[in-house]
Image (cartoon, rainbow, N blue to C red):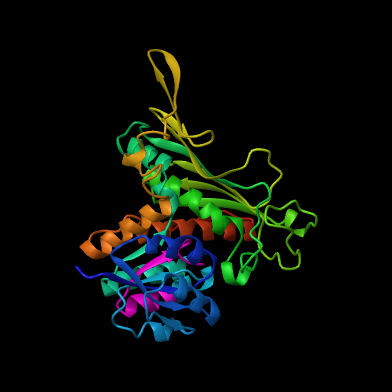
Amino acid sequence: MGKKVRVAIIGCGGIANGKHMPSLAKQEDVEMVAFCDIVEERAQEAAEKFGIEGAKVYKDYKELLKDKTIDVVHVCTPNRSHGFISVDSLEAGKHVMCEKPMAKTYAEAKEMLEASKRTGKKLTVGYQQRWRGDSLYLKAACDDGELGDIYYARAIALRRRAVPTWGVFLNEYEQGGGSLIDIGTHALDLTLWMMDNYKPKMVVGTSFKKLGKQTQTANAWGDWDPEEFTVEDAAFGFIVMENGATIVLESSWALNIADPNEAVTLLCGDKAGADMLDGLRLNYVKNGRQVIEKPDFKVGGVAFYEGKSASPADIECRTWIDAVKNDTEVSTKAEQALVVTQILEAIYESAKTGKPVYFED
């Protein structure tokens, strides 16, 4: 594909303006040619800021998909519509980058994967935390076997008071949940990716809406309306994989915790361990002594895309466009994102029923 990749944006809200469109705008071989939003003014504003001359604006995404010249669609809508918009886009012959999480439900995510296989079109999910310097360094260490067999992990996405009060984040119908599906998904994706383990056996989960009922909240983005807060403010999962490896997933938008930490992982293997709790630290025993190793990401960062080279979102975007242009495998595979959604759904189900959820073989 020597020509420029023609990209359409479906959903021109916060994540499109904050991540997808700015990163696409930096790619010289990309042109944004169409924009769609149920609020037409948002699509018009996006077209004027990021689109090529003559970029088209739509209120109905199905009209946009009729344009056969569009190569790629970025789905940046609320979680409820990730599934059917992605499937329709794939069926229309477009490659799809869907913002995380893959879908609101496992069944919808599975339909997305099946549509990708059926149509032969590429499908990826926006887990840009993989492209941080510390993430890439730790992934290389895991792949090289430096940690050995990783049998225990924590997937951590804990905020003290940072509830997103804009858009539909607090709306269970549109989003499917709160902190777990919003930021817990990043921590779980990172952890499974590091472990290269995508075979869950069972899950026990709990969820809470304790602080969401309060006022005078000291929230980072201002007080929320308790009447609109229809999702959990914290959720936790205990995940056992088929090989016995165990993951504890912790997520919160609001939690009385002194040391919040978001989109990080802690890994324990039989050769070494690692965590991202105070920068990236690897721990092991050498010459009969306990050792903690802290890589320096302030210098020499080009190899791991830190410093001036590019942001994680920019690297994710570049890698995605390269996969489309060169017809190569995407970096964040839909099969991986599917398991993330499967586990998140099981945590919510377990929290609701009070019972463990077992996965069928």
Screen quadrant of the C terminus: bottom left
Residue range (magenta): 85-105
Seen at 36% across and 59% down, the residue is 317
Q: Is residue 143 left or right of residue 80?
A: left
Seen at 24% across and 64% down, the residue is 325
Give percent across and percent down for residue 229: 70, 64
For residue 63, say whether it is visible: yes
Seen at 51% across and 54% down, the residue is 185
Q: Quadrant of residue 175?
A: bottom right
Residue extending farthest to the top is 288
Q: Quadrant of residue 117?
A: bottom left
Check if residue 104 falls in the magenta segment. Answer: yes
Query: Which residue occupies the foreground of this view, 339 or 274?
Result: 274
How many numbered circles are shown?
0
Give percent across and percent down for residue 132: 42, 45
Residue extending farthest to the left is 2
Q: Is residue 16 left or right of residue 157?
A: left
Give percent across and percent down for residue 221: 68, 56
Seen at 59% across and 52% down, the residue is 205
Query: Which residue occupies the foreground of this view, 211 or 192?
Result: 211
Query: Which residue occupies the foreground of this view, 225 or 272?
Result: 225
Q: Is residue 228 left or right of residue 167?
A: right
Q: Is residue 42 left or right of residue 321?
A: right
Query: Which residue occupies the foreground of this view, 101 or 20?
Result: 20
Screen quadrant of the N terminus: bottom left
